[in-house]
Amino acid sequence: MTKWELLKDLGITDRLLKFWVAWYKLPVNRRGRGSTYPLETIERLRWIKRLADSRYFTMRFVRELLRASQGGDRAAVDASLSLCRSVLSRQPIPAAARPSGAAAPEVAAQPQKRIGDDLL
């Protein structure tokens, strides 16, 4: 997929795309004046976009989650995804995904679209 197709698909600016690619260290096929994006990068950018739109997760959290998924630390990824799904679907966070000794946080009662079901 070319850069311009990806920008249109994600609905983000060129500057934000460049920042995300650099910040999250995503692979890009650079050739001449154009760039193409592999399928893995496109999927990760869509996932990052959904998390960014939710405004619940920091960029550092998302970066650490991506690193854990690339390194094969499946337990950390599963715990983090459980946390993401709980927050995005407005459900209480399971005790296994919370830091030890942390109480269950209050979740706002505002209705939002359920996007936590399609994470990874």
Image: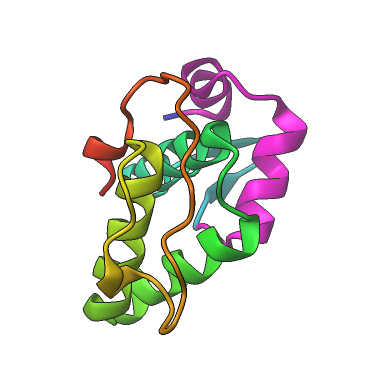
Query: Coloured how?
Result: rainbow
Q: Quadrant of residue 101?
A: bottom left
Asked if residue 79 is positioned above or below residue 8 in the image, the reply reads below
49 sits to left or right of 94: right
Which sits in the foreground, 4 or 76?
Answer: 76
> Residue at position x 61%, y 51% from top?
21
Q: Is residue 35 visible?
A: yes
Q: What is the span of residues highlighted in magenta in the rendered image?
A: 2-26
32 sits to left or right of 7: right
- As for residue 53 lying within the magenta part, the answer is no
Which sits in the foreground, 32 or 51?
Answer: 51
The picture places residue 98, in percent across and down from the top left corner, at 39, 71
The N terminus - image quarter: top left
Asked if residue 30 is positioned above or below residue 118 in the image, the reply reads below
Magenta-drawn stretch, dominant element (helix, strand or loop): helix
The picture places residue 88, in percent across and down from the top left corner, at 39, 39
The picture places residue 86, in percent across and down from the top left corner, at 32, 48
> Residue at position x 36%, y 37% from top?
90
Q: Is residue 33 visible?
A: no
Which sits in the foreground, 94 or 118?
Answer: 94
Q: Quadrant of residue 37?
A: top left
15 sits to left or right of 96: right
> Residue at position x 29%, y 82% from top?
73
Which sits in the foreground, 29 or 120?
Answer: 120
The picture places residue 38, in percent across and down from the top left corner, at 38, 45
Q: Quadrant of residue 34?
A: top right
